[in-house]
Amino acid sequence: MRAIRGKRGFTLVEVLVAMVMLAILSTGIATMMAVIVLHNDFARDMTEATMHGENRIEVFKNTDYASIPSGWDWDEPSPGFYRMWNVKDDTPQAGMKQTTVIVAWFDSKSQFHSVSLETILIP
């Protein structure tokens, strides 16, 4: 009976070692989760910015070629995103228009980001 009693449960040292290991693993997992959330926010913003740029290009493609004005213009397609575009006549060849659309935004850490899309419009 005495031999059975001595083998029951964990020792205090074993419990402390397990708690330290759990704390170390939890800290690593929490840090990893914070990094994942930041990258997820950036990916969402990049997707939204690209969508705004593609929407502007689609507007140009669905507009009568002769009525597309040359030069720079801009708008704010959604809060926090700024879309600028430039249309150059006769570039890269006569009768074509080179269009550049840039969408810019600031992330939650106030860092500036932008995405640029270009296309050639042909009548």
Image: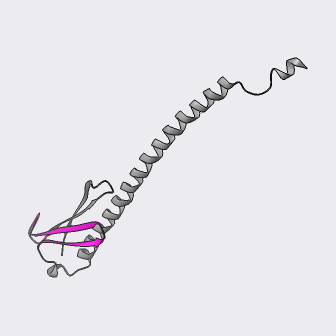
In magenta stretch: residue 75:
yes
- At 25% across and 58% down in the image, what residue appears? 114
Question: 35 and 102: which one is in front?
Answer: 35
> For residue 9, which quarter of the picture?
top right
Colour scheme shown: one colour
- At 27% across and 61% down in the image, what residue appears? 105
- At 23% across and 75% down in the image, what residue appears? 60
> For residue 95, which quarter of the picture?
bottom left
Q: Position of residue 37 (x, y in %)?
A: 43, 51
> For residue 3, which quarter of the picture?
top right
Q: Position of residue 92 (x, y in %)?
A: 11, 63
Q: How many marks?
A: 0
Q: Quadrant of the C terminus?
A: bottom left
Q: Is residue 109 left or right of residue 65?
A: right
Q: Position of residue 7 (x, y in %)?
A: 80, 22
Farthest residue in the right direction?
Answer: 1
Q: What secondary structure characterizes most of the magenta part?
A: strand
Q: Position of residue 43 (x, y in %)?
A: 38, 55
| Rendered view: 88 above or below 108 | below
Q: Quadrant of the N terminus?
A: top right
Farthest residue in the top direction?
Answer: 3
Q: Which stretch is magenta?
A: 69-96
